[in-house]
């Protein structure tokens, strides 16, 4: 027998949450947020984002989860730019820095 019942706020709060999808983190849907610039999350149910590795960047800042769901979303710095942070800060991996005068990064 099916009964239509209006749930109380407490009952709604106690409903199980769906895990956050890759590219997002949080305690579970609807409390999931897209990873910030410079980071990604590959696992369902992640509680934290992973900072892009040295020499890479990820500009998108919490726009689309699909821009943050693979390590490959972190792009290699273009020729003439670099990022030598050892994955210590998401913010430092939001972009690459222009090489100082007299130096270069030939990798492109």
Image (tube, rainbow, N blue to C red):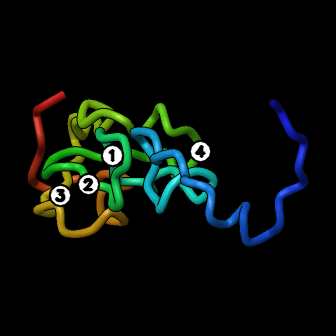
Sooner in the amino-acid sequence: mark 1 or mark 3: 1
Sooner in the amino-acid sequence: mark 4 or mark 1: 1
Which of the 4 image quadrants contains residue 8? bottom right
The reply to whether discs 2 and 4 touch (Cβ–Cβ < 8 Å) is no
Tell me if 92 is positioned left or right of 18 in this view. Answer: left
Residue 14: % across, % down: 62, 64
Q: Total label count?
A: 4
The reply to whether discs 4 and 3 touch (Cβ–Cβ < 8 Å) is no
Q: Residues within 10 Å of mark 4 (few under 14, many from 20)?
A: few
Name the disc covering residue 101, or none: 3
Q: Residues within 10 Å of mark 2 (few under 14, many from 20)?
A: many
> Mark 4 or mark 3, which is nearer to you?
4
Q: CA distance from mark 4 to mark 1?
A: 14 Å
Residue nearest the observer in this picture, 88 or 49 = 49
Sooner in the amino-acid sequence: mark 4 or mark 3: 4
Q: Residues within 10 Å of mark 3 (few under 14, many from 20)?
A: few
Tell me if 14 is positioned left or right of 24 in this view. Answer: right
Q: CA distance from mark 2 to mark 3?
A: 32 Å
> Mark 1 or mark 3, which is nearer to you?
1
Residue nearest the observer in this picture, 16 or 98 = 16
Name the disc covering residue 81, or none: none
Residue 52: % across, % down: 24, 50
Residue under label 1, please give it: 41
């Amino acid at each position: 027998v099916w009964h239509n019942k209006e749930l109380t706020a407490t009952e709604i709060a106690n409903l199980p949450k769906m895990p956050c999808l890759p590219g997002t983190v949080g305690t579970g849907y609807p409390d999931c947020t897209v990873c910030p610039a410079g980071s990604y999350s590959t696992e369902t149910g992640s509680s934290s984002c992973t900072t892009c590795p040295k020499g890479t960047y990820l500009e998108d800042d919490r726009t689309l989860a699909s821009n943050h769901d693979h390590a490959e979303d972190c792009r290699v710095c273009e020729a003439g730019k670099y990022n030598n942070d050892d994955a210590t800060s998401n913010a430092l991996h939001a972009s690459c820095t222009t090489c100082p005068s007299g130096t270069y990064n030939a990798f492109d």
